Image: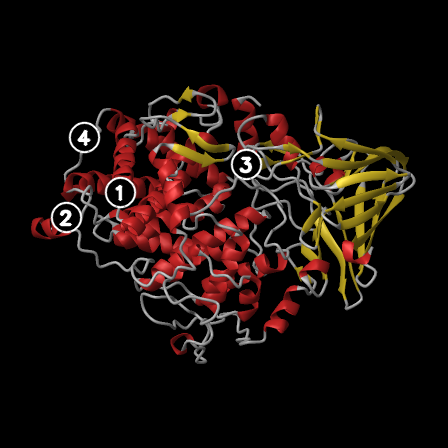
Amino acid sequence: MSSLTWYLKRLSLMSLEEIGHRVRAAARQWLEWPLHVFSHKAMPLSEFLRLTDQELNLYLARPRHVRFFKLRTGMPPMAISREATVAVADDLLEHRFTFFEFDREPLGDPLLWNYNYKHHRMSPLIYAPRIDYRDERAVGDVKYIWELNRHQHLVPLAKAYHLTGDERYAREVVAQILSWIEQCPYMMGINWTTAEQAGIRLISWIWAYDWVQFASCVTEEFLSRFLQSVYQHVQFITQNYSRHSSANNHLIAEATGVFMATVYFPELKNAARWRAESQAILAEQALQQNHPDGVNGEQATAYHCLVLEYLLLAGLLGEQNGFKFPDAYWAHLEKMMEVVAALMDCRGRLPHLGDDDNGSVVMLGTPLPSRARSILATGAALFERADLLALAPEFDERTFWLLGAGVSARNLYETSGLGFRGEGAGAHRGAPLQMTVRGPVSGRPRLVGDESFCLSLKRQSQAFESGYYIMRSGETAEDEVVTVFDCAPLGYGSLAAHGHADALSLTLTVAGREILIDPGTYVYHSEQTWRNYFRGTSAHNTIRIDEQDQSVIAGNFMWSEKAQAVLECWESFESYDLVRGHHTGYLRLADPVRHRREVTYEKEARVFRIVDTIEATGEHVVEQFFHLSEDCEIHREGQMWKIENDGVQVRLCADEQLELMLIKGQANPPLGWRSRRFGQKQPSPTLVGRMVGVGTGVLVTIVSIKTSAER
């Protein structure tokens, strides 16, 4: 897509108010251009710190009055993996990095912060607003530059110093920050092109600095240069907050970075104003970007978790330092955790709905066994939720660093200092500096000791008004069946940037084994054909008409004509679940088509009946897709597919009207792939049924389930 075409399409999705906002911002940037290009001298401390000379000398001695997350004593062995942390940190000392498809990849010495290590291109060191980071010819896939420059790897390095006292780790943190400041002058180069990346980098810097601040290598000279750059980061973000149609998870990342920096460094000039502004943004966006039922508006499970982690980080830091967020903020966080619990299977996995770039907020756990379970462990402690505790009985390292010592499954509801005392919603309880316990904001009672009841809560089918319908059965992990039916909006706002054309699709796991999957994301800014495939309709378990996507792609993070999914019926009883909906995506065709899907699940028999109704007048090509895990073995018997994955057997009987194909790893056009991690893809089997039909038609698919114990 040409740059002009992209800008025209992007412009069509903006309001007049947004256009005016962007014109003013561009004018300001160009007026400031001479200032940034010709002046990169070190600033006197008095220009960015609000301190007298005497206070400045005391400040440089580094006394800290800010309450941060980590309690430095009483680290329980069950929470901390010292060996794993040191192993990661030792790799980082040798500049071996693991992100996307890189696995302990040696990046050399010195690190080049403006270099794309995948596409081997150095981005130009020019005034940042002049750089088009979407231009792959100039910078390669910018994700590979930005991921390294988020500096999230500094956190395990700093943690290794904290756990071992080995100055090598602290020296590496200091050296990398100084080299970054040297190579990336303020407003020059690719790393000053977006406020979101600056916000994430700020979060990493603050966590890393808190762990190494008393190391001998943290000199007054370092601190002076570091604080100047922190100030510049905050100033840059506050002047360039993502607004209007861009105000999605990026805005939350930016505000979290500013909030953390201004709480942690209150001596920065304008800190109080910037802190209040960022806190107001977070309090507003927590409600605005999430549906009332707790589902994040991006309609992407990975971004649901990401946004939840940003909001959690800001909220906890604010609580510790007297900057409290409203009860509605915490109530939304609790609801977001309930969504994670509802979507998660018995192995702690979530379906890969929508985009997923493996983004994280801060690298506190090494490794993180299950992101979903880690979130629920934090929620169990924070909100005194025994039902969440039952789903995450092991309190992981990330939860420990966020909430402090004394957190364990055993003592959560037994320690008197943490007990529920009946205060109002959002009341602050618990021992200062050790953990923040709010109690159940939702009003849900404590479920002390009733673990069997908690487990039964997880297995209930559940509907979210925002569009996710979850069908469940099973009394144990080995007979658990989980299907997620997607009748949700395409995505958030006018761009729907991270949504996929997946209306009326469904996923299926049995006993924690993946059967029907959402194939994932793979890329964002490069390989346009693959970007379009992984978010297109043919990459999801739904129906495609005339080889066209349900919604019309307008750019890597834009959709023009958007399918609207509409729920018609949801019923859930002990014996069966039923959901029915349709979408409007194909009403745009010359001969309009409406796709309606009804899914019935008979729980005792463990049989799904999927009825697809195609309402049309003329002739159309109809394709039905079912994407399977790469771990599945498939055999065909007529119109029936026999699918097996580690002892779980599923029979999928397709409608007799369909011509059936099994496709795996097809390159042109792409079909039969999955991407478990950003930047990686692998062949996976896809069942395709195809027909040419005239007028209205009905396709019936039967899916029956057996486990090894039943055969």
Q: Is residue 240 left or right of residue 39?
A: right
Q: CA distance from mark 4 to mark 3?
A: 39 Å
Q: Observer-nearest residue: 641 or 207?
A: 641
Few, some or many C-alpha atoms within 10 Å of disc 3 (few <14, some 14-19, many ≥20)? some
Which percent across, then down, holds residue 81? 41, 52
Q: CA distance from mark 4 to mark 2?
A: 20 Å
Marks 4 & 2, CB-CB < 8 Å contact: no
Marks 1 & 3, CB-CB < 8 Å contact: no
Any mark on residue 678, and which? 3
Which residue carries the number 1 mark? Answer: 170
Of callouts 3 and 2, the N-terminal one:
2
Mark 4 residue element: loop
Few, some or many C-alpha atoms within 10 Å of disc 1 (few <14, some 14-19, many ≥20)? many
Of callouts 1 and 4, the N-terminal one:
4
Q: Is residue 510 left or right of residue 80?
A: right
Which residue carries the number 2 mark? Answer: 60
Q: CA distance from mark 1 to mark 4?
A: 26 Å
Mark 3 residue element: loop
Mark 2 residue element: helix
Residue farthest to the left, as pictured:
54
Q: Observer-nearest residue: 599 or 647?
A: 647
The answer to whether residue 261 is visible is no
